[in-house]
Structure formats: C-alpha cells, structure tokens
C-alpha cells in the first residue's frame, strides 16, 4: 500500500514521490555519464550497473544481448561488487530469449521466473527481480534486469525506474551504432540541430513558453498566434501567470498549489504538471512546467530557467470512446489522403493540358506534388510495366534502399519468392477489375538488410498520370503480425500443457486403480479368506461371541472389497485396457441402468474396435461418464440415446436425452458447469469438434466428431 504525505493543500502519494526521485536520479545520471566527449561503452555500462544496484539496493544488475540471430547471446553485469562478461548458449540462451519477450516482475512465490534467472546466471539464487526488454530499431535487442537474493518490495516506481533505464541504454546502444565518432565540439552540427529544433518547436500545436528565473516569458513558439493569445514578440517579458489566466480565466485549480508556490518549488521537483479548464469555451488544458538543464561543458545555450508547455486536451478527455474508433479513423484519414492525392493529380493533369508551354508553372506543380507525396503516412510508389517509376521517402525507409537503387527496379523482387505468385495474381485481378482498387492483402517482404516484413498492399490504376501507371500504397503491419504469432505460440504451448495434464491425470487414475485392485483388494481378500478358514476349522475351538465377531468382520471386509473394486472401476475400468471401448460402453451402460433404474439407455455402435485409437478410447469413456452423470443429476430425463459410428472419414459420437434441456439446466446451475468445459477440452485436445445444443421439443444433444485418421499429438 502506498503512503501519502500531507503538504497543506494537497496530498502526494509516496509512489509518485518515489517515481519522481527515481526519474530525477536517471536524469542526473544520464547527463553526467553520457555527456562525455569520448564514450567508452564498457565503462558506461559498468557505471550503469553500479548505479542501478545502488539506487534499487539490489544484489545483481546485468544487460543481456542477443547475438547471431538468437543462437548465442552475451550477458554482462555486476553481482555484488564483481563484474562479469560472458557468452551464453543452449539452455542459458533459451532463458535469455524468454526474458527478451516481455517485461517481468516476480517475487518469492514465482518459482518459474526464479528458475529462469538461476539458469541464466548459472546458479545465482534470486528471490525477487525485475526484467525489461531493450528494444532497438529492427526488433528486440536484449534485456535489462536487476535481481536480489532477498524478497524486495517491487513497487510501481521501481518498475518505472528499470523501464526508464532500459530506454536510456537502448538509445545509447543505437547511438553507438549510428554515430560512434560523434563530436560535441562540432559547431556546425550544433547550429543545424538548433535550427531544426526551433523549426520543430514552432510547428508544434502545443504552446511552448521559455521562462526566465523571474518567471517572465523569454520566448514562445508560433502556437501563440494560432491560439489568438498575441504574437511572438508581444508576449515577451509578460509573466507566465498572466498568460495562464488568459488561457484559463479561473487560474490554477484550488486543489493544487498557487502559482507562486509552484514556481518556488520548481527547482526542487524539476517538473510540475496540472490540468485546468476554461469554463467559457469548455476546453481542457494540460500545463507542464519543467526546469531547463544545461550540463554541456563550456557551452551556454540560453539563459532560460524553465519551459512551460500548454496542450489542449479537450478531445483526449474522451479517450475511451475515441480509442475504440481509432483504427477506423486512421483508415479514413489514409483514404482521405489518397483522395487528396488523386485530386492533386487531377489538378496537375489539367494544368499540364492547359499550360504545356509554361515550364515554370509545371515545375512548381511538380514540387507541390512531390512534397505531398513524401509527407504521406503510407509507403507509396508508382509502377509502370511492373517496374518502380517513382517512390516516396517512406517507401525507401521501409525497404532500406536508396531512392536511386529503387528507380526502375522490378517491384516483385522486393518480396519473398513464395509471395510473388500471390502478388502477380493481384496485378491480374486489378486488370480484371478495369482499374478499380483492389482489396488489401498481406504479403511478406524483405528490406535491404534481409529482415522479414509483413506488409498490407492496396493498388489501383492512376489514370491521371498514365493508362498503365499503378499506384501502390503499402502499410507496415509487422508489429501486429509479430503479436499475433506470439499469441498463437502461447496458445499452442497452453494446449500442449493441457494435454500433458490430462494424460498425467489418466495415468495417475490408472495407477491408483491398479493399487486398489491389486494391492488393497487382494490384501483384504486374503484377510477375509483367512478368517473364513479360521471359522471353518473344526480343531479351533472358538466360542460363539468370537465367531459372531469374525462373521460380522468378514461381511464388512467383503463390503470394503466391493467398495475398493467400485472405486477402481470409477478411476480407470480395467475392462477398457483388457477388452476395449465397446465392451466398456456396454458394461458402463449396464452399471448406470442398475444404479439409476428410472433411466433407460438406448445404444447403437456402428464401428469396429480397431477404428478407434487408444488415446481416444479413454476420451470417449470420460465423455460418456460425465454426460450420463449430468443427465442423472440435472436433465430429469428417462431415456438416453448413445450412437457411436464411423461415417466416411470421421468418427461420430452423439448423446441425446429427453430431459428439460441444456438452457434450463444451466439456469439451475447458475453458470456453465465445469463438466461441460472438461468434455469440450478433452475433445479439442484429441483433435475433435464439440457441440452441445437444445433438442426440439425437449432434451439436449451432445455431438462430437473426430477425423478417423489420428493426427500426431491428438
């Protein structure tokens, strides 16, 4: 449970304070460590491990990296004060790969996660820990983890700390690959970066305000004009409090500190955020006030003290409804972009027809066309004769080729050979549709680095350019497909575990049945025979009282033997292993009718014993056992029909009763019973299909089908 701290006008959660403290530590660590002119990877990583252990007070911190397409890996880190750096393969590599799939938090009760940590660290005993995958461009890169030999409190603030450190290390690793020799003294790059940054800030929809130490405005971006709050120059030296009152006349909500208290506490906290509304316009705004840190040696960028970012969050307050419509809105936006592109192409065509002699106007129109083409969200290219005539920047980024390399390249060569036939069929369908747009299809492509991509394609004839020109829109859906494949693998593993659990359960039942029959049953029978021999022995002079006690004991032993045999038959009837499923069905139906005399069973079997595999025999017996027990307890039926037959390439089993029906039985139970779920699970794990419906006019039908050819694993 998180603690709270009373500050007079507000109550602050200790988890929030912890998170703020952790993030401030990360900020200071990053600025101090990664601002060095010469970046030493080993030194920085060792400092990172030491920093994480000291902040979280954990025994072990390490970074695991995937190498050689996941066949080998490398882990390096620190256990207590000892540094280690070693390669891993085999079982340890499997443990490393599993940690790279998703974030993981465990305590003393999570045996599986603790075992993975012990395997990876070669016997290190971990009682608690946190691991976070490190994502780099192109997919998972590795994992960052901290472990402890004691049971530690794994709060949300600590989890956020590890995730933030993983992001810092991910950025560092990518910067090492992309800019290994970056020099902070390169003034030209700094100036260019400053110009790009200022242009980017001015293009933002958010209002960005730079404040001096006196709380007055030093600079604002161009959003001040769009918000009709003044011009860039008119607001200079105005106080931030006045600007806030213009945006939200009610000022800062009373539940928060006042502006003077916020400004006074800003150096301590580094970042303060709040939300307020404008009653007149009904709009909501989020205010984020953050101090400006400048720790680059000998470089003084500005005299600004803090940055205030104001964002209109009116629409985001309806996030729950808009999230449901997000995909639809995104598709509509892309369609609108395509419509705009078609309209622009039409306008360009008209201009070309009207102004063929005006080359300057043509060049301007082409410039506008290319700018819009490159700024679209989709990867777009134009094809003529199956070759790429033109493509936008997003297309080049997606396939990792230069624009010059793609010019006049054969389009289908960008895709895997097994998908090229499907792509050619798509071209044929497009021609058959007389130029209308095709449906979206998913193909596998490969980029310049030979990485696999899942792509959605939509194409149509672009008649505005040429009768033979095709415009292709491509969307990268690789992350979604990877998630689908991961879920599919998880379902397969869960299904395998369920099958193993059922097999283990049946083996244990069989063992217990044999123990009851061969062990306990035989021992009791031997005792009974000995006592009977004792009574029949004329040379043994027993008085009447002892004979009476022995006779009663024999009767009780005989009853106990019968009970043991009945229990053994319920657990695993030996007749199933000795004589097969058909004889077992006949025996079970006789026993059921003997127990429930008011219920009559009609059975029909139209197949041979060899038509059913051994694995499915026990499944059929358990289904009959559960179904007839449900009929006896809930159906209120007097007749049950059982049909087991082989039809064509399938084996079918149907159980029909004339009771009150499945839905009324469910109403009496309150919910779907565990027995029905168990039957369905057994059938599906054995490769069959399960269906249960209400009969007309009354009763219930359970219908099951298996393919007659046994599939591996069923």
Image (tube, rainbow, N blue to C red):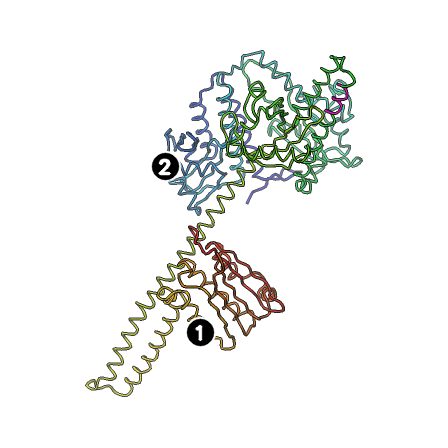
CB contact under 8 Å: marks 1 and 2? no
Residue 120, by quadrant, is top left
Q: Work out whether 175 lies above or below 506.
A: above
Density class for disc 1 (Cα within 10 Å; few <14, some 14-19, many ≥20) is: some
Q: In which quarter of the image is the N terminus?
A: top right
Q: Mark 2 points at which residue?
A: 90
Question: Gap in Å between the C-alphas at discs 1 and 2?
Answer: 56 Å
Q: Residue 590 carries which label?
A: 1
Residue 196, by quadrant, is top right
Q: Nearer the viewer, residue 596 or 16?
A: 596
Q: What stretch is highlighted in magenta?
A: 345-352
Residue 537 counted in the magenta span: no
Numbered disc 2: secondary structure: helix
Q: Residue 515 carries which label?
A: none
Q: In this view, does 503 lie to the left or right of 379?
A: left
Residue at image location 44% in from the left, 41% down from the top: 128
């Amino acid at each position: 449970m998180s603690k709270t701290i009373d500050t007079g006008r507000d109550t602050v959660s200790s988890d929030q304070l912890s998170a703020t403290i952790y993030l401030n530590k990360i900020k200071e660590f990053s600025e101090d460590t990664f601002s060095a002119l010469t970046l030493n990877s080993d030194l920085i990583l060792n400092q990172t491990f030491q920093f994480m252990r000291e902040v979280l007070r954990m025994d072990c911190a390490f970074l695991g990296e995937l190498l050689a397409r996941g066949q080998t890996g490398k882990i390096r880190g620190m256990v207590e004060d000892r540094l280690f750096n070693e390669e891993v393969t085999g079982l340890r590599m499997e443990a490393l790969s599993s940690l790279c799939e998703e974030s993981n938090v465990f305590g003393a009760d999570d045996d599986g996660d603790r075992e993975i940590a012990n395997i990876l660290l070669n016997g290190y005993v971990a009682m608690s820990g946190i691991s976070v995958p490190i994502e780099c461009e192109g997919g998972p890169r590795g994992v960052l983890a901290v472990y402890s030999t004691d049971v530690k409190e794994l709060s949300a603030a600590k989890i956020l700390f590890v995730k933030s450190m993983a992001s810092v290390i991910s950025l560092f690793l990518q910067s090492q690959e992309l800019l290994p020799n970056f020099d902070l003294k390169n003034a030209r790059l700094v100036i260019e970066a400053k110009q790009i940054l200022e242009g980017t800030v001015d293009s933002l929809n958010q209002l960005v305000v730079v404040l001096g130490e006196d709380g007055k405005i030093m600079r604002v971006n161009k959003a001040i004009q769009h918000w009709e709050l003044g011009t860039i120059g008119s607001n200079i030296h105005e106080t931030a409090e006045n600007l806030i009152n213009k945006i939200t006349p009610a000022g800062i909500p009373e539940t928060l500190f006042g502006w003077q208290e916020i400004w006074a506490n800003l150096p301590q906290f580094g970042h303060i955020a709040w939300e307020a509304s404008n009653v007149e316009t009904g709009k909501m705004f989020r205010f984020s006030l953050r101090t400006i840190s400048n720790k680059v040696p000998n470089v003084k960028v500005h005299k600004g003290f803090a940055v205030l970012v104001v964002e209109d969050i009116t629409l985001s307050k309806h996030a729950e409804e808009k999230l449901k419509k997000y995909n639809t809105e995104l598709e509509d936006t892309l369609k609108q972009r395509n419509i705009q592109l078609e309209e622009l192409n039409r306008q360009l065509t008209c201009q070309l027809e009207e102004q063929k002699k005006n080359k300057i106007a043509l060049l301007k129109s082409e410039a506008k066309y290319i700018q819009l083409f490159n700024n679209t969200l989709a990867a777009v290219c134009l094809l003529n004769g199956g070759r790429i005539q033109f493509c936008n920047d997003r297309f080049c980024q997606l396939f990792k080729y230069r624009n010059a390399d793609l010019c006049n390249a054969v389009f289908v060569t960008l895709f895997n050979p097994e998908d090229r036939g499907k792509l050619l069929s798509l071209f044929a369908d497009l021609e058959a549709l007389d130029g209308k747009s095709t449906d979206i299809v998913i193909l596998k492509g490969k980029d310049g680095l030979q990485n696999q991509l899942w792509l959605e394609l939509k194409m149509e004839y672009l008649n505005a350019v040429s009768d033979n020109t095709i415009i292709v829109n491509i969307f990268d859906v690789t992350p979604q497909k990877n998630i689908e494949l991961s879920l599919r693998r998880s379902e397969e593993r869960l299904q395998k575990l369920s099958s193993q659990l059922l097999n283990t359960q049946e083996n244990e039942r069989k063992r217990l049945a044999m123990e009851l029959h061969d062990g306990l049953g035989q021992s009791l029978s031997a005792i009974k025979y000995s006592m009977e021999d004792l009574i029949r022995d004329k040379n043994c002079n027993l008085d009447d009282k002892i004979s009476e006690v022995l006779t009663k004991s024999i009767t009780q032993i005989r009853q106990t033997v019968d009970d043991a045999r009945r229990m053994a038959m319920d657990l695993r009837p030996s007749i199933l292993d000795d004589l097969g499923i058909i004889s077992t069905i006949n025996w079970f139906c006789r026993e059921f009718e003997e127990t429930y005399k008011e219920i009559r069973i009609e059975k029909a079997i139209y197949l041979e014993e060899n038509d059913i595999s051994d694995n499915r025999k026990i499944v059929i017996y358990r289904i009959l056992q559960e179904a007839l027990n449900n009929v006896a307890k809930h159906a209120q039926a007097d007749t049950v029909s059982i049909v087991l037959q082989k039809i064509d390439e399938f084996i079918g089993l149907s159980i029909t009763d004339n009771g009150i029906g499945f839905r009324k039985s469910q109403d009496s139970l309150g919910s779907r019973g565990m027995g029905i779920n168990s039957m369905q699970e057994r059938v599906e794990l054995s490769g069959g299909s399960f269906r249960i419906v209400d009969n007309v006019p009354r009763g219930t039908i359970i219908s099951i089908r298996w393919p007659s050819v046994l599939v591996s694993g069923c």
